[in-house]
Amino acid sequence: MIQLDGISKSFDRARTFVVRGVSLEVRDGETLVLLGASGCGKTTTLKMVNRLIEPTAGVIRLDGRDTAEMDILTLRRGIGYVFQNIGLFPHMTVAENAEIVPRLLGWSRARRAGRARELLALVGLDPEEFGARYPRQLSGGQQQRVGIARALAADPKHLLMDEPFGALDAVTRDQLQAELLRIRASLGKTIIFVTHDLFEAVRLGDRIGVMNAGRLEQLGPPRELLQNPATEFVAELFGHARRQADLLVEANA
Ligand SMILES: Nc1ncnc2c1ncn2[C@@H]1O[C@H](COP(=O)(O)OP(=O)(O)O)[C@@H](O)[C@H]1O
Ligand SMILES: [Mg+2]
């Protein structure tokens, strides 16, 4: 379980706040999607969970423990992180990228190699075919699969995913969303997934938290947001998507 309690962040000594009083709870095994436009504070919120960024105010708890008081390595060991824009190391092979965390943890070479094979297979990449390649020899979708494998390497209980499919074409994104649903069902992770894409949010989120200008506008299951928007902003977000869907229907009429 991940709990955010009154989390705020200012980068300029409290003159302006990019995250404002966000409180939420991610239940064990749940995928909570943070949905909002570019610049609304999604990445900043996510990075405060594994302390890549320290909150200005508020407390974050992981399974009840205040993260500010945890050893940072212990904390990060329990949290997988999938970066926005993929973020593989270009000078390392696919297998080496997947093994980064196990290497930091001091696993033996044999154990690491076995785990890398297992992980690549899990994310749908043949280890024999892809393990020795470099990231530049992969498509964007394949690179992002490696990014997911890397985040899962030490079998963390929690997973943070920052627009992992944002840079991919629609067909590849659709495939990877399906893969994530499959992996998630078999692994039972607690996930915070950040996106600006409403359709992705509805597909993947057990609950969606809509963010706007650093605030959490509404948090609930997709259906509740759709049928019972708490604010004008949330209503307009879904209204916009509905108009897009109507256009498709009209074009097909
Ligand atoms: N290290 C930083 N220093 C100053 N401002 C930052 C920093 N990181 C992010 N910001 C600002 O905080 C706001 C939220 O950024 P971010 O959390 O990356 O948004 P999102 O991920 O929703 O696009 C933006 O206005 C951004 O420019
Ligand atoms: Mg971001």
Image: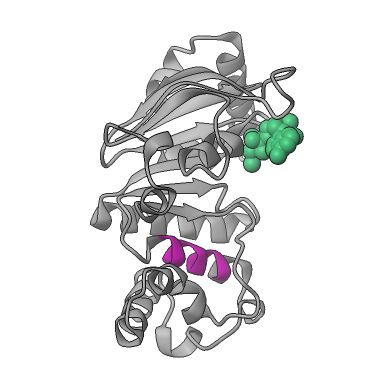
Provide residue 155's location: percent of width, then percent of height: 31, 61
Question: Is residue 197 among the parts visible in the rendering?
Answer: no
Q: Is residue 140 above or below residue 9?
A: below
Residue appearing at x 34%, y 70% in the figure: 122
Relative depth, front residue between 222 and 38: 38
Relative depth, front residue between 2 and 30: 2
Ligand 2 shows up in which quadrant of the image? top right
Q: Is residue 143 above or below residue 253?
A: below
Residue appearing at x 50%, y 21% in the figure: 22
The C terminus - image quarter:
top right
Quadrant of the rendered structure where residue 125 is? bottom left
Question: Is residue 170 among the parts visible in the rendering?
Answer: yes
Instruction: Spot the residue most to the top.
Output: 231
Residue appearing at x 54%, y 71% in the figure: 142
Q: Is residue 110 above or below residue 85?
A: below
Q: Is residue 224 left or right of residue 187?
A: right
Type of secondary structure dominating the magenta stretch: helix
Provide residue 97's location: percent of width, then percent of height: 51, 74
Q: Is residue 218 above or below residue 26?
A: above
What colour scheme was applied to this rendering of the protein? one colour
Quadrant of the rendered structure where residue 118 is? bottom left
Relative depth, front residue between 8 and 182: 8
Provide residue 55's location: percent of width, then percent of height: 55, 30
Provide residue 13's location: percent of width, then percent of height: 71, 23
Q: Which residues are magenta?
A: 143-151
The N terminus - image quarter:
top left
Q: Is residue 126 left or right of residue 28?
A: right
Query: Quick check: is 43 in the magenta stretch?
Result: no
Question: In the rendered picture of this protein, how many numbered marks are placed on residues?
Answer: 0
